Image (tube, grey):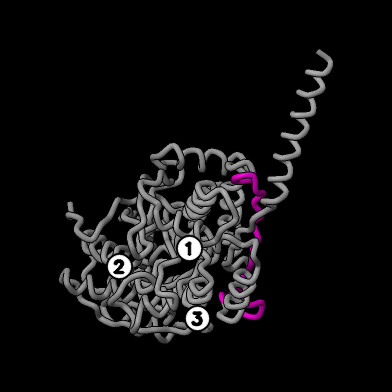
Amino acid sequence: MKRLAHMIGTSLVLMMAAVLGQAQAQGSIKIVTSWPIQGSMIPEGTAMKQAVDLAVKHYGGSVAGMKVEVVNRDDASPTTGSWDGTVEAEIAQKAVADPDVMVYLGTYNSGAAKVSMPITNKAGLVQISPANTYPGLTKEGFGAGEPKVYRPSGHVNYFRAFPADDIQGSSAAAWAKCLGFKKVYVLDDRQLYGKGIADVFVASAKKLGMEIVGHDGVESADVDFRALLTKVKASGADLVYGGFVIDSGGVQILQQMKALGLFEQKVKFMGPDGLYSPALVEQATPAAANDNVYVTFAAVPPDKLPTEVGKRFYKDYLETYKAEPIGWAMYAYQSAIVALEAIKKVGKKDRAAILDAVRQTKDFEGVTGKFSFDANGDTNRTDMVGWMVKDSKFVYAAGISADMQCK
C-alpha cells in the first residue's frame, strides 16, 4: 500500500509539474489598446480602458493558460491633446514588434486608424476598433483606393462590432426630417471621421428633401467660430449638423451658438457619436446643451442593454467603478471579449490563428445582441439610437434608421 501511495503521489507531482510547465511555456499574452487618454478625452478614454480591464477580469485574467496583460497606450500628442499620426504609428510599430502582442484594440479616431491599419495588416496582427466609424476603412466607394490601401497584405485583419457612418449618417438625416427640420447648415472638422459623416448626412438629407443651406469645414485648432456662426445665423437654418468629436471643435460651436443667440432663435444642434459623452455637456455647459442638442449613437442606454452579456457588463461596471459606463465603453468591452474568445478558441500564442478565429466570428452574443462579421470585418447589426440632452444628461429619444417612418 505504501508503494502504491508513493506511486500515486509521484504521479500527481509529475502531473502538476507538467501543467505548471505548460503554463510557464505558454507564458503571457498582451493586448495593446490605443486611443487618447488626456485632455477632453480623459472621461471617454478612461471608461474604454476600464471596460477592457473588466472584460479581462470576466475571463479570470487569463485565457488558455496564458496570463492576459493589457498594455494601454495614449495616441494623443502631449502638445495638442488630440490624436497624432506619428504617435499612433509608433504605438502600432512597437506592438507588431513585440511577439507577445496578439491583439491591437484601437483606435478611437478613424484618422488614426488609417495610420495603424497598414502596419498591423502587414504583420498579420488582428486589429479590433472600439470606436472607428468612417465607412471607407472597410467599404468601397468613399475614398480613393479604400479600403485596399489599408490592406497591403491583401487580407482583412481589421474589425469593428458596431455600425459604420454610412448607417449612422443616413439615420441621422431621417431622424432630423422626422423632427421637423427643413434647413440645415452643416459643419465638420475636416478630419476623416467628421467630414466623412457630414458628407453622408448631406447626401441623405438632400434625398429626403431637406435644404442644405451651407457646408463649411473648420480647423480643430480654432476656438473662435463667431464669424462663421454669424453666417449660419443669417442663413435661416433651423438645424446645425456638426461632424465633430469632443476635442475637435464641437464644444466651442455649442458655446458660441449659445452666446450668439442661435438657440434663442430655436436653432438646434445635431451631432454624431463622437459627441456622445458627458464631457460634451460639462465642457459646453448645461446652459448651452440642455434641450438644444441631439446626438446619434449605436446602442440603447447601458442600463437597457437587452442581452445577458450586456446586463452583466453594465452591472459589473457599475459595481467595479462606481460610475455609469459612458460612450464607447460598451463597445470597448465588446471588442475585448471578441478578442479573448478568439484566443480561447485557438488556445495558443499564434497571431495567424487568432486572426482567423476573429474572422470566423458568427452569431456572437454581444452587448446589444448577436452579430457576425462580414468579409470586410463589419458587423451585420444596424442598431442606431437618437439621444437628446435634457437636465444635463443624455436621454433616450428614439430608435432611428435610414428608412424610419415619421409619426
Residue under label 3? 220
Q: Earlier in the sequence, mark 1 or mark 3?
A: 1
Circle number at residue 129: 1
Q: Amino acid at mark 3?
A: Ser
Q: In front of the other: label 1 or label 3?
A: 1
What segment carries the magenta color?
Answer: 61-83
27 left or right, relative to 50? right
Image point (62%, 65%), residue name? 37
* Front residue of 186 and 128: 128
Mark 1 neighbour density, 10 Å: few (under 14) some (14–19) many (20 or more) = many
Residue under label 2? 166
Q: Amino acid at mark 2?
A: Asp
* Front residue of 277 and 154: 154
73 left or right, relative to 148? right
Disc 1/disc 2 C-alpha distance (Å): 17 Å
| Tag 1 near tag 3, CB within 8 Å | no
Image point (82%, 18%), residue name? 3
Does any portion of residue 63 appear in the rendered image?
yes
Percent position (x, y) of residue 264? 36, 68
Disc 3/disc 2 C-alpha distance (Å): 23 Å
Percent position (x, y) of residue 374? 33, 59
Q: Earlier in the sequence, mark 3 or mark 2?
A: 2
Residue 54 belongs to magenta span? no
Q: Amino acid at mark 1?
A: Ser
